[in-house]
Image: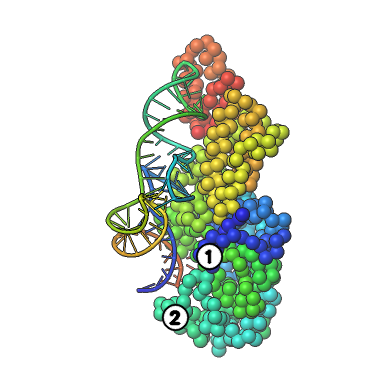
RNA sequence: GGCCGGAUAGCAAAUCGGUUAUGCAGUGGAUUGCAAAUCCAUCUAGACCAGUUCGAUUCUGGUUCCGGCCUCCA
Protein backbone atom coordinates (compact mmCIF):
# COMPACT_ATOMS: atom_id res chain seq x y z
CA UNK A 1 0.00 0.00 0.00
CA UNK A 2 1.36 3.37 -1.02
CA UNK A 3 1.63 5.93 1.74
CA UNK A 4 2.38 9.59 1.10
CA UNK A 5 3.06 12.39 3.55
CA UNK A 6 0.47 15.10 3.02
CA UNK A 7 1.49 18.64 3.96
CA UNK A 8 -2.18 19.46 4.44
CA UNK A 9 -2.74 16.87 7.18
CA UNK A 10 0.89 16.71 8.35
CA UNK A 11 0.66 12.91 8.29
CA UNK A 12 1.53 10.00 6.09
CA UNK A 13 -1.70 8.84 4.52
CA UNK A 14 -2.69 5.82 2.47
CA UNK A 15 -2.87 7.14 -1.05
CA UNK A 16 -6.12 6.52 -2.91
CA UNK A 17 -6.62 8.31 -6.24
CA UNK A 18 -9.99 9.91 -6.91
CA UNK A 19 -10.27 7.73 -10.01
CA UNK A 20 -8.74 4.31 -9.25
CA UNK A 21 -7.44 4.11 -12.81
CA UNK A 22 -5.85 7.49 -13.07
CA UNK A 23 -3.67 9.74 -10.95
CA UNK A 24 -3.51 13.45 -11.70
CA UNK A 25 -0.40 15.25 -10.47
CA UNK A 26 0.61 18.87 -10.89
CA UNK A 27 4.04 20.19 -9.96
CA UNK A 28 5.10 23.82 -9.97
CA UNK A 29 7.92 24.07 -12.45
CA UNK A 30 10.42 26.73 -13.26
CA UNK A 31 10.30 30.44 -13.87
CA UNK A 32 12.53 30.54 -16.91
CA UNK A 33 14.81 33.56 -16.65
CA UNK A 34 18.03 31.75 -15.73
CA UNK A 35 19.66 28.32 -15.65
CA UNK A 36 18.26 25.73 -13.27
CA UNK A 37 20.16 25.24 -10.01
CA UNK A 38 20.53 22.23 -7.73
CA UNK A 39 17.34 23.08 -5.88
CA UNK A 40 15.44 22.76 -9.14
CA UNK A 41 17.32 19.55 -9.82
CA UNK A 42 16.00 18.07 -6.61
CA UNK A 43 12.41 18.83 -7.52
CA UNK A 44 12.90 17.53 -11.06
CA UNK A 45 14.50 14.29 -9.92
CA UNK A 46 12.23 13.56 -6.96
CA UNK A 47 9.01 14.09 -8.86
CA UNK A 48 10.47 11.93 -11.60
CA UNK A 49 11.06 9.16 -9.05
CA UNK A 50 7.55 9.71 -7.70
CA UNK A 51 6.01 9.57 -11.17
CA UNK A 52 7.91 6.40 -12.08
CA UNK A 53 6.66 4.76 -8.91
CA UNK A 54 3.07 5.92 -9.36
CA UNK A 55 3.10 4.51 -12.88
CA UNK A 56 3.87 1.08 -11.47
CA UNK A 57 0.87 1.35 -9.16
CA UNK A 58 -1.78 2.86 -11.38
CA UNK A 59 -2.81 2.32 -15.00
CA UNK A 60 -2.49 5.97 -15.90
CA UNK A 61 -0.66 8.93 -14.42
CA UNK A 62 -1.12 12.40 -15.84
CA UNK A 63 1.91 14.41 -14.77
CA UNK A 64 1.65 18.14 -15.45
CA UNK A 65 4.56 20.45 -14.76
CA UNK A 66 4.16 24.06 -15.77
CA UNK A 67 6.53 26.67 -17.07
CA UNK A 68 6.18 30.24 -15.84
CA UNK A 69 7.22 32.24 -18.85
CA UNK A 70 5.89 35.64 -17.83
CA UNK A 71 6.65 37.51 -14.61
CA UNK A 72 8.53 40.48 -13.24
CA UNK A 73 11.91 38.79 -13.16
CA UNK A 74 11.61 37.65 -16.74
CA UNK A 75 10.66 41.14 -17.86
CA UNK A 76 13.53 42.64 -15.90
CA UNK A 77 16.07 40.15 -17.25
CA UNK A 78 14.87 40.67 -20.84
CA UNK A 79 15.32 44.42 -20.48
CA UNK A 80 18.80 43.95 -19.01
CA UNK A 81 19.75 41.64 -21.86
CA UNK A 82 18.04 43.86 -24.44
CA UNK A 83 16.42 40.63 -25.52
CA UNK A 84 12.91 39.74 -26.58
CA UNK A 85 11.03 37.96 -23.80
CA UNK A 86 10.22 34.94 -25.92
CA UNK A 87 13.76 34.52 -27.07
CA UNK A 88 14.88 34.68 -23.42
CA UNK A 89 12.34 32.20 -22.11
CA UNK A 90 12.77 29.80 -25.02
CA UNK A 91 16.49 29.78 -24.48
CA UNK A 92 16.12 28.83 -20.81
CA UNK A 93 13.39 26.31 -21.53
CA UNK A 94 15.75 24.54 -23.91
CA UNK A 95 18.49 24.66 -21.29
CA UNK A 96 16.11 23.23 -18.69
CA UNK A 97 15.27 20.34 -20.99
CA UNK A 98 18.94 19.62 -21.50
CA UNK A 99 19.54 19.60 -17.73
CA UNK A 100 16.53 17.39 -17.19
CA UNK A 101 17.79 14.87 -19.71
CA UNK A 102 21.24 14.80 -18.16
CA UNK A 103 19.62 13.91 -14.83
CA UNK A 104 17.66 11.04 -16.37
CA UNK A 105 14.38 12.85 -15.75
CA UNK A 106 11.57 11.77 -18.08
CA UNK A 107 9.51 14.63 -19.49
CA UNK A 108 6.13 15.30 -17.88
CA UNK A 109 3.03 14.37 -19.85
CA UNK A 110 2.05 18.00 -20.22
CA UNK A 111 4.22 21.07 -19.84
CA UNK A 112 1.88 24.04 -20.11
CA UNK A 113 3.19 27.57 -20.41
CA UNK A 114 1.56 30.41 -18.52
CA UNK A 115 1.37 32.53 -21.67
CA UNK A 116 -0.77 29.85 -23.32
CA UNK A 117 -3.22 29.80 -20.45
CA UNK A 118 -4.26 33.44 -20.23
CA UNK A 119 -7.87 32.70 -21.21
CA UNK A 120 -8.20 30.15 -18.45
CA UNK A 121 -6.92 32.73 -16.00
CA UNK A 122 -9.46 35.29 -17.22
CA UNK A 123 -12.20 32.82 -16.60
CA UNK A 124 -11.07 32.07 -13.09
CA UNK A 125 -10.52 35.71 -12.15
CA UNK A 126 -13.95 36.59 -13.53
CA UNK A 127 -15.55 33.86 -11.45
CA UNK A 128 -13.78 35.09 -8.34
CA UNK A 129 -14.97 38.66 -8.96
CA UNK A 130 -18.52 37.43 -9.54
CA UNK A 131 -18.41 35.55 -6.29
CA UNK A 132 -17.18 38.63 -4.49
CA UNK A 133 -13.85 37.11 -3.46
CA UNK A 134 -11.85 39.32 -5.80
CA UNK A 135 -12.01 43.01 -6.58
CA UNK A 136 -10.37 45.61 -8.76
CA UNK A 137 -8.48 48.33 -6.95
CA UNK A 138 -8.53 51.93 -8.06
CA UNK A 139 -5.08 51.44 -9.61
CA UNK A 140 -6.61 48.83 -11.90
CA UNK A 141 -4.94 45.77 -10.35
CA UNK A 142 -7.26 42.91 -9.47
CA UNK A 143 -6.78 41.44 -5.99
CA UNK A 144 -7.88 38.33 -4.18
CA UNK A 145 -9.59 39.13 -0.90
CA UNK A 146 -8.12 36.66 1.56
CA UNK A 147 -10.62 37.52 4.28
CA UNK A 148 -13.37 36.24 2.02
CA UNK A 149 -11.96 32.73 1.85
CA UNK A 150 -12.67 30.84 4.98
CA UNK A 151 -9.95 28.22 4.80
CA UNK A 152 -7.09 30.62 4.20
CA UNK A 153 -3.98 29.30 5.96
CA UNK A 154 -5.00 25.67 6.21
CA UNK A 155 -2.05 24.37 4.21
CA UNK A 156 0.73 26.39 5.81
CA UNK A 157 -0.77 26.42 9.28
CA UNK A 158 -0.87 30.18 9.30
CA UNK A 159 -3.58 32.37 10.62
CA UNK A 160 -4.60 35.66 9.06
CA UNK A 161 -4.45 37.70 12.25
CA UNK A 162 -0.96 36.49 13.07
CA UNK A 163 0.15 37.14 9.52
CA UNK A 164 -1.42 40.55 9.74
CA UNK A 165 0.63 41.41 12.81
CA UNK A 166 3.89 40.75 11.02
CA UNK A 167 2.86 41.99 7.60
CA UNK A 168 4.93 44.54 5.80
CA UNK A 169 3.23 47.72 4.77
CA UNK A 170 2.92 47.86 1.04
CA UNK A 171 2.29 51.49 0.25
CA UNK A 172 2.11 51.29 -3.50
CA UNK A 173 -0.89 49.07 -3.78
CA UNK A 174 -4.53 49.58 -3.41
CA UNK A 175 -5.38 46.50 -1.38
CA UNK A 176 -8.25 46.34 1.05
CA UNK A 177 -6.14 44.08 3.23
CA UNK A 178 -2.35 43.98 3.19
CA UNK A 179 -2.44 40.21 2.73
CA UNK A 180 -4.57 40.35 -0.41
CA UNK A 181 -2.55 39.25 -3.40
CA UNK A 182 -2.64 40.27 -7.03
CA UNK A 183 -4.50 38.25 -9.66
CA UNK A 184 -4.12 40.64 -12.56
CA UNK A 185 -1.56 43.37 -12.75
CA UNK A 186 -1.83 46.47 -14.92
CA UNK A 187 1.02 46.78 -17.40
CA UNK A 188 3.33 49.77 -17.55
CA UNK A 189 3.58 51.27 -21.05
CA UNK A 190 6.59 49.35 -22.36
CA UNK A 191 5.79 46.03 -20.71
CA UNK A 192 4.33 42.99 -22.43
CA UNK A 193 0.61 42.76 -21.83
CA UNK A 194 -2.64 41.06 -22.70
CA UNK A 195 -5.90 42.93 -23.02
CA UNK A 196 -8.42 41.84 -20.46
CA UNK A 197 -11.80 42.86 -19.09
CA UNK A 198 -9.88 44.82 -16.43
CA UNK A 199 -7.42 46.55 -18.74
CA UNK A 200 -4.14 45.67 -20.39
CA UNK A 201 -1.90 43.75 -18.09
CA UNK A 202 -0.46 40.42 -17.08
CA UNK A 203 -1.38 37.67 -14.64
CA UNK A 204 -0.17 37.37 -11.09
CA UNK A 205 1.99 34.38 -10.34
CA UNK A 206 -0.44 32.41 -8.24
CA UNK A 207 -3.36 32.43 -10.66
CA UNK A 208 -1.29 30.74 -13.35
CA UNK A 209 -0.96 27.50 -11.46
CA UNK A 210 -4.60 27.41 -10.40
CA UNK A 211 -5.72 27.95 -13.98
CA UNK A 212 -3.30 25.49 -15.58
CA UNK A 213 -3.75 22.71 -13.05
CA UNK A 214 -7.56 22.84 -13.12
CA UNK A 215 -7.56 23.09 -16.89
CA UNK A 216 -5.49 19.93 -17.32
CA UNK A 217 -6.52 17.86 -14.34
CA UNK A 218 -9.97 19.13 -13.41
CA UNK A 219 -11.13 21.16 -10.43
CA UNK A 220 -10.32 18.39 -7.98
CA UNK A 221 -7.25 16.24 -8.47
CA UNK A 222 -4.88 13.97 -6.57
CA UNK A 223 -1.42 15.39 -6.02
CA UNK A 224 0.08 18.84 -6.13
CA UNK A 225 3.78 19.27 -5.51
CA UNK A 226 6.65 21.68 -5.50
CA UNK A 227 9.53 22.91 -3.41
CA UNK A 228 8.91 23.50 0.27
CA UNK A 229 9.29 27.24 -0.15
CA UNK A 230 6.13 27.28 -2.26
CA UNK A 231 3.93 26.11 0.59
CA UNK A 232 3.35 29.70 1.61
CA UNK A 233 2.16 31.82 0.03
CA UNK A 234 2.02 30.22 -3.41
CA UNK A 235 0.19 26.99 -2.66
CA UNK A 236 -1.94 28.57 0.03
CA UNK A 237 -3.05 31.12 -2.55
CA UNK A 238 -3.69 28.44 -5.15
CA UNK A 239 -6.06 26.73 -2.75
CA UNK A 240 -7.82 30.02 -2.07
CA UNK A 241 -8.18 30.73 -5.79
CA UNK A 242 -9.22 27.29 -6.97
CA UNK A 243 -11.52 26.40 -4.12
CA UNK A 244 -12.90 29.95 -4.06
CA UNK A 245 -13.70 29.85 -7.77
CA UNK A 246 -14.76 26.22 -8.14
CA UNK A 247 -16.45 25.65 -4.82
CA UNK A 248 -14.90 22.22 -4.47
CA UNK A 249 -11.83 20.65 -2.87
CA UNK A 250 -8.82 21.49 -5.01
CA UNK A 251 -6.17 18.88 -4.17
CA UNK A 252 -6.13 15.80 -1.95
CA UNK A 253 -2.40 15.37 -1.36
CA UNK A 254 0.16 18.17 -1.13
CA UNK A 255 3.79 17.13 -1.47
CA UNK A 256 6.78 19.34 -0.77
CA UNK A 257 10.41 18.63 -1.50
CA UNK A 258 13.01 19.87 1.01
CA UNK A 259 15.76 22.34 0.29
CA UNK A 260 19.21 21.85 -1.02
CA UNK A 261 21.55 23.46 1.51
CA UNK A 262 25.04 24.82 1.33
CA UNK A 263 26.76 24.70 4.71
CA UNK A 264 23.37 24.08 6.30
CA UNK A 265 21.83 27.14 4.73
CA UNK A 266 19.22 27.11 2.03
CA UNK A 267 20.57 27.38 -1.50
CA UNK A 268 18.74 30.22 -3.17
CA UNK A 269 18.98 32.91 -5.73
CA UNK A 270 18.43 35.59 -3.14
CA UNK A 271 21.34 34.37 -1.01
CA UNK A 272 23.46 34.00 -4.12
CA UNK A 273 24.84 30.67 -2.92
CA UNK A 274 23.48 28.54 -5.71
CA UNK A 275 25.11 26.11 -8.11
CA UNK A 276 23.59 25.56 -11.52
CA UNK A 277 22.96 22.05 -12.73
CA UNK A 278 25.11 22.57 -15.78
CA UNK A 279 27.91 23.95 -13.64
CA UNK A 280 27.92 20.86 -11.45
CA UNK A 281 27.73 18.63 -14.52
CA UNK A 282 31.17 19.88 -15.49
CA UNK A 283 32.63 17.94 -12.56
CA UNK A 284 30.12 15.11 -12.00
CA UNK A 285 28.00 13.07 -14.35
CA UNK A 286 24.21 13.33 -14.32
CA UNK A 287 23.69 9.91 -12.80
CA UNK A 288 25.93 10.80 -9.85
CA UNK A 289 23.87 13.96 -9.30
CA UNK A 290 20.70 11.93 -9.46
CA UNK A 291 22.07 9.39 -6.98
CA UNK A 292 23.17 12.20 -4.67
CA UNK A 293 19.64 13.64 -4.71
CA UNK A 294 18.07 10.26 -3.99
CA UNK A 295 20.51 9.49 -1.18
CA UNK A 296 18.47 11.45 1.32
CA UNK A 297 14.73 11.42 1.90
CA UNK A 298 12.88 13.98 -0.23
CA UNK A 299 11.53 15.92 2.73
CA UNK A 300 14.87 16.18 4.55
CA UNK A 301 17.40 18.87 3.83
CA UNK A 302 20.09 17.84 1.37
CA UNK A 303 23.53 19.26 1.97
CA UNK A 304 25.38 20.03 -1.22
CA UNK A 305 29.14 19.50 -1.02
CA UNK A 306 31.97 17.91 -2.96
CA UNK A 307 32.34 15.31 -0.23
CA UNK A 308 28.74 14.23 -0.61
CA UNK A 309 28.89 14.25 -4.39
CA UNK A 310 32.03 12.12 -4.28
CA UNK A 311 30.31 9.74 -1.91
CA UNK A 312 27.50 9.40 -4.43
CA UNK A 313 30.02 8.67 -7.15
CA UNK A 314 31.75 6.00 -5.05
CA UNK A 315 28.42 4.41 -4.19
CA UNK A 316 27.38 4.19 -7.83
CA UNK A 317 30.78 2.76 -8.66
CA UNK A 318 30.17 -0.07 -6.23
CA UNK A 319 26.79 -0.86 -7.77
CA UNK A 320 28.14 -0.76 -11.31
CA UNK A 321 31.12 -2.88 -10.28
CA UNK A 322 28.71 -5.56 -9.10
CA UNK A 323 26.93 -5.61 -12.47
CA UNK A 324 30.06 -5.36 -14.55
CA UNK A 325 30.89 -8.30 -16.77
CA UNK A 326 27.70 -10.18 -16.03
CA UNK A 327 25.32 -11.05 -18.81
CA UNK A 328 22.03 -9.26 -19.04
CA UNK A 329 20.01 -12.26 -20.04
CA UNK A 330 16.86 -12.18 -17.98
CA UNK A 331 16.25 -15.92 -18.06
CA UNK A 332 16.37 -16.68 -14.36
CA UNK A 333 15.59 -13.26 -13.01
CA UNK A 334 11.95 -13.80 -12.16
CA UNK A 335 12.76 -16.98 -10.34
CA UNK A 336 15.50 -15.26 -8.35
CA UNK A 337 13.26 -12.32 -7.64
CA UNK A 338 10.72 -14.72 -6.18
CA UNK A 339 13.26 -16.54 -4.10
CA UNK A 340 14.85 -13.47 -2.52
CA UNK A 341 12.92 -10.59 -1.07
CA UNK A 342 14.98 -7.77 -2.58
CA UNK A 343 12.30 -6.61 -4.96
CA UNK A 344 9.46 -6.70 -2.47
CA UNK A 345 11.50 -4.82 0.12
CA UNK A 346 12.60 -2.33 -2.49
CA UNK A 347 9.02 -1.69 -3.49
CA UNK A 348 7.91 -1.49 0.11
CA UNK A 349 10.48 1.19 0.84
CA UNK A 350 9.25 3.31 -2.05
CA UNK A 351 5.67 2.69 -0.98
CA UNK A 352 6.59 4.22 2.36
CA UNK A 353 6.52 7.85 1.26
CA UNK A 354 9.16 7.29 -1.42
CA UNK A 355 11.96 6.32 0.93
CA UNK A 356 14.81 6.32 -1.58
CA UNK A 357 17.65 5.93 1.01
CA UNK A 358 16.17 2.60 2.10
CA UNK A 359 15.58 1.58 -1.50
CA UNK A 360 19.23 2.32 -2.26
CA UNK A 361 20.42 0.37 0.78
CA UNK A 362 18.60 -2.67 -0.61
CA UNK A 363 20.49 -2.26 -3.87
CA UNK A 364 23.72 -2.56 -1.87
CA UNK A 365 22.53 -5.75 -0.23
CA UNK A 366 21.76 -7.03 -3.69
CA UNK A 367 25.20 -6.00 -4.93
CA UNK A 368 26.75 -7.94 -2.07
CA UNK A 369 24.71 -11.01 -2.99
CA UNK A 370 25.88 -10.71 -6.60
CA UNK A 371 29.52 -10.40 -5.57
CA UNK A 372 29.21 -13.43 -3.32
CA UNK A 373 27.60 -15.56 -5.99
CA UNK A 374 30.01 -14.58 -8.73
CA UNK A 375 32.48 -17.34 -7.97
CA UNK A 376 29.97 -19.90 -6.76
CA UNK A 377 27.05 -19.79 -9.14
CA UNK A 378 27.45 -17.58 -12.18
CA UNK A 379 23.89 -18.14 -13.38
CA UNK A 380 22.50 -16.91 -10.14
CA UNK A 381 24.92 -13.97 -10.17
CA UNK A 382 23.67 -13.11 -13.66
CA UNK A 383 20.08 -13.31 -12.58
CA UNK A 384 20.71 -11.13 -9.52
CA UNK A 385 22.60 -8.59 -11.64
CA UNK A 386 19.64 -8.44 -13.93
CA UNK A 387 17.41 -7.84 -10.95
CA UNK A 388 19.68 -5.05 -9.72
CA UNK A 389 19.41 -3.37 -13.10
CA UNK A 390 15.66 -3.74 -13.07
CA UNK A 391 15.29 -2.22 -9.61
CA UNK A 392 17.62 0.57 -10.75
CA UNK A 393 15.31 1.27 -13.66
CA UNK A 394 12.47 1.86 -11.22
CA UNK A 395 14.28 4.90 -9.88
CA UNK A 396 16.18 5.84 -13.03
CA UNK A 397 19.72 4.66 -12.29
CA UNK A 398 22.06 1.85 -13.44
CA UNK A 399 20.75 1.93 -16.99
CA UNK A 400 24.00 2.72 -18.75
CA UNK A 401 26.51 0.06 -19.59
CA UNK A 402 28.65 -0.69 -16.53
CA UNK A 403 31.87 -0.49 -18.49
CA UNK A 404 31.09 2.94 -19.89
CA UNK A 405 30.12 4.25 -16.48
CA UNK A 406 33.28 2.91 -14.89
CA UNK A 407 35.53 4.17 -17.67
CA UNK A 408 34.06 7.59 -18.27
CA UNK A 409 36.09 10.75 -17.97
CA UNK A 410 39.51 9.26 -18.62
CA UNK A 411 41.74 11.23 -20.97
CA UNK A 412 43.90 8.43 -22.31
CA UNK A 413 42.57 6.53 -25.34
CA UNK A 414 41.37 2.97 -24.83
CA UNK A 415 43.97 1.57 -27.22
CA UNK A 416 46.80 3.23 -25.30
CA UNK A 417 45.51 1.84 -22.03
CA UNK A 418 45.17 -1.63 -23.53
CA UNK A 419 48.73 -1.40 -24.86
CA UNK A 420 49.99 -0.50 -21.38
CA UNK A 421 48.08 -3.38 -19.87
CA UNK A 422 49.55 -5.75 -22.42
CA UNK A 423 53.04 -4.47 -21.63
CA UNK A 424 52.40 -5.03 -17.96
CA UNK A 425 51.05 -8.53 -18.57
CA UNK A 426 54.27 -9.39 -20.36
CA UNK A 427 56.34 -7.98 -17.54
CA UNK A 428 54.30 -9.99 -15.07
CA UNK A 429 54.76 -13.13 -17.12
CA UNK A 430 58.51 -12.50 -16.96
CA UNK A 431 58.24 -11.88 -13.22
CA UNK A 432 59.54 -8.38 -13.81
CA UNK A 433 57.38 -6.95 -11.05
CA UNK A 434 59.35 -3.73 -10.84
CA UNK A 435 58.33 -2.93 -14.42
CA UNK A 436 54.75 -4.11 -14.03
CA UNK A 437 54.31 -2.01 -10.89
CA UNK A 438 55.85 0.96 -12.60
CA UNK A 439 53.34 0.70 -15.45
CA UNK A 440 50.50 0.39 -12.97
CA UNK A 441 51.73 3.47 -11.09
CA UNK A 442 51.88 5.46 -14.31
CA UNK A 443 48.29 4.60 -15.05
CA UNK A 444 47.23 5.40 -11.50
CA UNK A 445 48.72 8.86 -11.99
CA UNK A 446 46.40 9.28 -14.94
CA UNK A 447 43.38 8.30 -12.86
CA UNK A 448 43.22 4.75 -14.15
CA UNK A 449 42.92 1.89 -11.70
CA UNK A 450 43.81 -1.66 -12.73
CA UNK A 451 42.00 -4.70 -11.46
CA UNK A 452 43.53 -8.14 -12.01
CA UNK A 453 41.31 -11.18 -12.08
CA UNK A 454 41.39 -14.76 -13.31
CA UNK A 455 39.98 -13.50 -16.61
CA UNK A 456 42.70 -10.91 -17.13
CA UNK A 457 43.13 -7.29 -16.24
CA UNK A 458 40.40 -4.67 -16.50
CA UNK A 459 40.49 -0.99 -15.66
CA UNK A 460 38.28 1.79 -14.39
CA UNK A 461 38.59 5.47 -13.67
CA UNK A 462 39.67 6.43 -10.18
C1' G B 1 7.47 38.24 17.53
C1' G B 2 4.07 34.12 15.18
C1' C B 3 4.14 29.26 12.90
C1' C B 4 6.90 24.84 11.43
C1' G B 5 11.06 21.27 11.07
C1' G B 6 15.58 19.06 12.80
C1' A B 7 19.68 17.22 16.33
C1' U B 8 21.87 9.34 14.94
C1' A B 9 28.59 6.72 15.18
C1' G B 10 34.95 9.86 11.73
C1' C B 11 31.52 11.25 7.31
C1' A B 12 26.73 10.46 4.71
C1' A B 13 21.97 8.52 5.80
C1' A B 14 17.41 5.44 7.30
C1' U B 15 14.47 2.32 10.18
C1' C B 16 12.75 0.95 14.73
C1' G B 17 9.86 0.69 21.95
C1' G B 18 13.77 -4.96 23.05
C1' U B 19 16.97 -8.22 17.48
C1' U B 20 23.39 -6.47 11.89
C1' A B 21 20.28 -0.68 8.63
C1' U B 22 23.11 0.67 4.38
C1' G B 23 27.41 3.17 1.91
C1' C B 24 32.30 5.56 2.54
C1' A B 25 36.48 5.72 5.87
C1' G B 26 39.29 2.70 9.97
C1' U B 27 41.05 -2.13 12.02
C1' G B 28 41.96 -7.68 11.54
C1' G B 29 41.66 -11.82 8.15
C1' A B 30 40.89 -14.47 3.21
C1' U B 31 42.37 -13.63 -1.85
C1' U B 32 46.70 -11.31 -4.79
C1' G B 33 53.83 -11.58 -6.64
C1' C B 34 52.33 -6.76 -4.47
C1' A B 35 47.95 -4.06 -5.27
C1' A B 36 42.95 -3.09 -6.82
C1' A B 37 38.22 -5.30 -6.74
C1' U B 38 35.65 -8.89 -3.82
C1' C B 39 34.36 -11.76 0.57
C1' C B 40 34.45 -12.63 6.08
C1' A B 41 35.02 -10.39 10.85
C1' U B 42 35.28 -5.91 13.66
C1' C B 43 35.52 -0.70 16.16
C1' U B 44 33.07 4.05 16.40
C1' A B 45 25.79 6.11 17.61
C1' G B 46 21.46 8.35 19.02
C1' A B 47 22.45 16.91 21.78
C1' C B 48 21.15 17.46 27.13
C1' C B 49 17.69 16.68 31.51
C1' A B 50 13.44 14.47 33.45
C1' G B 51 9.10 11.17 32.92
C1' U B 52 6.11 6.78 31.02
C1' U B 53 7.76 1.47 30.50
C1' C B 54 10.13 -4.82 32.55
C1' G B 55 12.95 -2.14 28.71
C1' A B 56 13.54 4.14 24.82
C1' U B 57 17.69 6.34 20.04
C1' U B 58 12.40 5.38 19.14
C1' C B 59 6.68 7.78 23.21
C1' U B 60 5.78 12.45 26.61
C1' G B 61 7.53 17.11 28.82
C1' G B 62 11.46 20.58 29.36
C1' U B 63 16.51 22.71 28.06
C1' U B 64 20.23 23.94 24.50
C1' C B 65 21.66 24.46 19.58
C1' C B 66 20.57 24.60 14.20
C1' G B 67 17.43 25.41 10.03
C1' G B 68 12.91 27.02 7.35
C1' C B 69 8.39 30.01 6.41
C1' C B 70 5.95 34.70 7.68
C1' U B 71 8.66 39.42 0.83
C1' C B 72 10.43 36.79 -4.80
C1' C B 73 12.31 31.77 -4.38
C1' A B 74 12.22 24.75 -6.06
What element does badge 2 sit on?
A: helix
In three-dimensional space, the C-alpha distance between marks 2 and 1, rounded to whole angstroms, equals 22 Å
Can you say whether A2 is above or below A346 in the image? below
Q: Nearer the viewer, mark 2 or mark 1?
A: 1
Residue A35 is situated, as x and y percent measured from the top left of the image, at 56, 57
Can you say whether A227 is above or below A458 in the image? below
Question: Looking at this view, is A460 or A367 the one in front?
Answer: A367
Q: Residues within 10 Å of mark 1 (few under 14, many from 20)?
A: some
Q: Give me the residue at 67% from left, 54% from top.
A: A57
Q: Give me the residue at 60% from left, 40% from top.
A: A341
Identify residue for label 1.
A7
Residue B2 is situated, as x and y percent measured from the top left of the image, at 39, 73
Task: Give the quadrant of the N terminus of chain A.
Answer: bottom right
* Disc marking residue A161: 2
What element does badge 1 sit on?
A: loop
Q: Chain of mark 1?
A: A
Q: Give me the residue at 47% from left, 73% from top.
A: A158
Question: Looking at this view, is A30 or A124 the one in front?
Answer: A124
Residue A131 is situated, as x and y percent measured from the top left of the image, at 63, 85
Q: Residues within 10 Å of mark 2 (few under 14, many from 20)?
A: few
| Labels 2 and 1 within one chain | yes
Q: Chain of mark 2?
A: A
Q: As drawn, is A95 to the left or to the right of A268?
A: right
Residue A342 is situated, as x and y percent measured from the top left of the image, at 59, 41
Asked if one can make out residue A102 in the rendered structure from this viewpoint, the answer is no
Amino acid sequence: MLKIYNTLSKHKEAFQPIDPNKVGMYVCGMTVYDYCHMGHARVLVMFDVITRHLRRHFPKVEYVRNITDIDDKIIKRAVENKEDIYSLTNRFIDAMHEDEQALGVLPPDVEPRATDAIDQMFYMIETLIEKGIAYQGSNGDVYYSVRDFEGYGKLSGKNLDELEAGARVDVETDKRDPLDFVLWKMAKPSEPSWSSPWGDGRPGWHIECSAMSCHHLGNHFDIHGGGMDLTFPHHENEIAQSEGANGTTFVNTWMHVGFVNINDEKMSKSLGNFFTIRGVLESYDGETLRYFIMSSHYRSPLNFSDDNLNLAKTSLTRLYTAIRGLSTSDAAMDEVSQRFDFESRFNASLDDDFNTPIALSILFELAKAINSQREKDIDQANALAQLLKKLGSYIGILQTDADSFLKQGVDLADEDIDAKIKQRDEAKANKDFALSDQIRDELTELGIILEDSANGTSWRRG
